[in-house]
Image (spheres, rainbow, N blue to C red):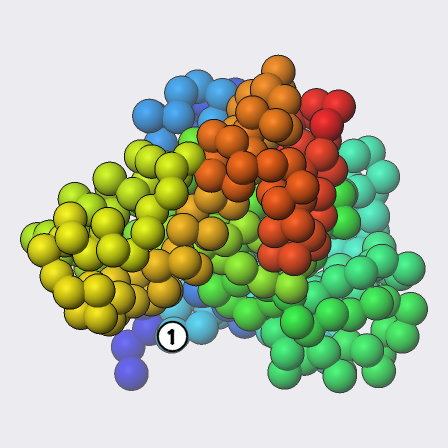
Amino acid sequence: MAITTIGVNIVPNTAQTSGPLVVVLAYDGLCTFEFGIAYEVFGLPRPEMGTAWYRFAVCGIEQGPLRAAGGLTVSVDRGLDALDEADLIVVPGWRGIDAPVPDDLISALRAAHERGARLMSLCSGVAVLAASGLLAGRRATTHWRYVSAIAALYPEITLDASVLYMDEGSIMTAAGSAAGIDLCLHVVRGDFGAEAANSVARRLVVPPHREGGQAQFISAPVPQEREGVRLGPLIEWMRARLDEEQPISLLAAKAGMSQRTFQRRFETTTGSSVGEWLLKERLRHARELLERRGDASLDDIAIACGFGTPATMRHHFRKRLGTSPGAYRRSFSGGTG
């Protein structure tokens, strides 16, 4: 079989942008899917984001050319020196959960972390962070298949296989490969706000947030509706009136259907019952207001989102997100709650 060579000697955004420098590791045995996720989110030129968007570079941890999954070879211009400048270092899935991690890479990661760089692993990339010792005493996650192996090798790490990703501040870990998208969008959201994360998600054609065990950081999903002629406009009408009561009888009448038919078609279209969909949308809207409207009271936000009272809103935040509206606001807007 012919081998395709891809020259990865890219720093596509450093000349045009001035934002945080994201450096992704490349190595022999590179996991191309996770590498592609990091490039797609942080490295793809996005002029609509302005000049403060991320800069991007690739760091080869060993001499190339490097073999990559899918019969590719990768050539990288920069070595471990790239980590000296990185603001965020991304470790794609590692070449083997028990494969040794080079000592010079461990030293470079520790030095970068010491000077304030953030570190992120995707899927089995957690093995690299674990080997560095930087996860000791911290919570982390990885693909459920690797949890037992990592736990046996590094018992000092608190592993949770039930979450999509874990944010420990300066060190972040994602579960399976696709969860890397969730974590990358989470980082964008923290760095540039919800609108930027939503914009990137739309380009990726993925929901900007997915529910998960780490609910205070992983928000409710935006349904991917395949909207019919009648339900599409109705769903937008519902979104615009989250502060109002929306009984099934009213919605069915507006859709021109019987209540039973409407409920069945709505669930087929959105993946949720009407009540569940409304709750998720109200929680989404509440989170947006908490992030953007630091001057708004919890009473006003509860009314604007259709919860009626702060107590009701607080109940749903606790039940669905594992946090309170005030704590959420402090985490994502810097407000006082």
Judge by depth and name the residue closer to the eye, 132 or 301: 301
Q: What x and y, as percent, mark residue 121? A: 65, 58
Residue depicted at x 56% and y 25%: 300
Amino acid type shown at disc 1: Gly
**Where is residue 275, by image quadrant?**
bottom left
Q: What x and y, as percent, mark residue 247? A: 32, 51
Judge by depth and name the residue closer to the eye, 328 or 175: 328
Q: Is residue 157 visible?
A: yes
Q: What x and y, as percent, mark residue 71? A: 38, 75
Query: Crowding at label 1, few (<14), some or many (≥20) Cα neighbours within 10 Å?
Result: few
Vertical side of 54 occupied by 234: above or below: below
116 relative position to 188: left or right: right
Q: Quadrant of the N terminus?
A: bottom left
Q: Is residue 88 visible?
A: no
Residue depicted at x 79% and y 65%: 130
Furthest-front residue in view? 249
142 relative position to 188: left or right: right
Count of marks overlaid on the render: 1
Judge by depth and name the residue closer to the eye, 249 or 46: 249
Q: Which residue is mark 1?
A: 71
Residue depicted at x 24% and y 39%: 237
279 relative position to 261: left or right: right
Q: Secondary structure at mark 1?
A: loop
Q: What x and y, as percent, mark residue 282? A: 47, 43
Q: Quadrant of the C terminus?
A: top right
Furthest-top residue in view? 295
Judge by depth and name the residue closer to the eye, 326 or 201: 326
Residue depicted at x 63% and y 28%: 298
